[in-house]
């Protein structure tokens, strides 16, 4: 219940900020259109169902995501594969200044919730927000180096 209240408060704050003026509302509409056209998006999700959230099947269970992306392609300046010393594979998403600010705010307000990485409309990675991310570098796990390579190929339009 506590997590739901935090997420609803964070979403309300973000939505309120987007609806304060006509020009801000138009910017929000443009951001949503960009997200729909983006090859890469990040959506915020939680474990509890709530009005306005979209169910996303994850393994044996479900998460419930905001339908509009919180980060879109225009927020990123680079994506590259990373392999940890233990062999785990990741994608490192580096954000531009605009994206860095969004990520810092989002990760501070929604700790414990999830980020869903979408590529061309398909969820390809899930990560839980454990702490604020201030440096503009988002590390998303992948299944393997081959999975990372496939995601990068899909981003560049080489795979369907």
Image: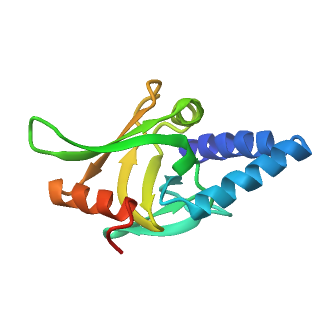
Q: Residue furthest left?
A: 86
Total labels drawn:
0
The vertical placement of 82 against 72, above or below, is above
Residue 128 lies left or right of residue 153; in this view the side is: right
Q: Residue furthest right?
A: 22
The residue closer to the viewer here, 45 or 85, is 85
Residue 95 lies left or right of residue 2; in this view the side is: left
Q: Which residue is found at the position 42% from the left and 62% from the top?
A: 119
Colour mapping: rainbow
Quarter in which the C terminus is drawn: bottom left
Q: Looking at the image, can residue 72 be seen? A: no
Percent across and percent down for residue 53 are 61, 63
The residue closer to the viewer here, 153 or 47, is 153
Q: Quadrant of residue 144?
A: bottom left
Q: Quadrant of residue 143?
A: bottom left
The residue closer to the viewer here, 52 or 149, is 149
Q: Which residue is found at the position 67% from the left and 57% from the top?
A: 32
Q: Residue furthest bottom?
A: 160
Percent across and percent down for residue 131 are 42, 30
Q: Which residue is found at the position 37% from the left and 53% from the top?
A: 126
Q: Which residue is found at the position 68% from the left and 63% from the top?
A: 51
Q: Quadrant of residue 118?
A: bottom left
Residue 91 lies left or right of residue 21; in this view the side is: left
Percent across and percent down for residue 79 are 36, 44
Percent across and percent down for residue 10 are 65, 40
Q: Looking at the image, can residue 16 be seen? A: yes
């Amino acid at each position: 219940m506590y997590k739901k209240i935090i997420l609803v408060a964070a979403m309300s704050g973000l939505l309120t900020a987007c609806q304060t003026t006509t020009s801000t509302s138009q910017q929000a509409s443009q951001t949503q259109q960009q997200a729909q056209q983006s090859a890469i998006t990040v959506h915020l999700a939680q474990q509890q169902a709530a009005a306005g959230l979209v169910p996303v099947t994850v393994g044996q269970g479900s998460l419930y995501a905001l339908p509009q992306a919180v980060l879109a392609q225009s927020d990123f300046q680079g994506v590259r594969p990373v392999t940890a010393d233990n062999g785990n594979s990741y994608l490192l998403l580096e954000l531009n200044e605009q994206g860095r600010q969004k990520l810092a705010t989002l990760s501070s307000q929604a700790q414990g919730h999830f980020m869903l990485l979408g590529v061309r409309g398909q969820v390809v990675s899930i990560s839980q927000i454990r702490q604020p991310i201030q440096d503009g570098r988002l590390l998303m796990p992948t299944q393997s180096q081959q999975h990372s390579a496939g995601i990068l190929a899909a981003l560049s339009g080489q795979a369907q």
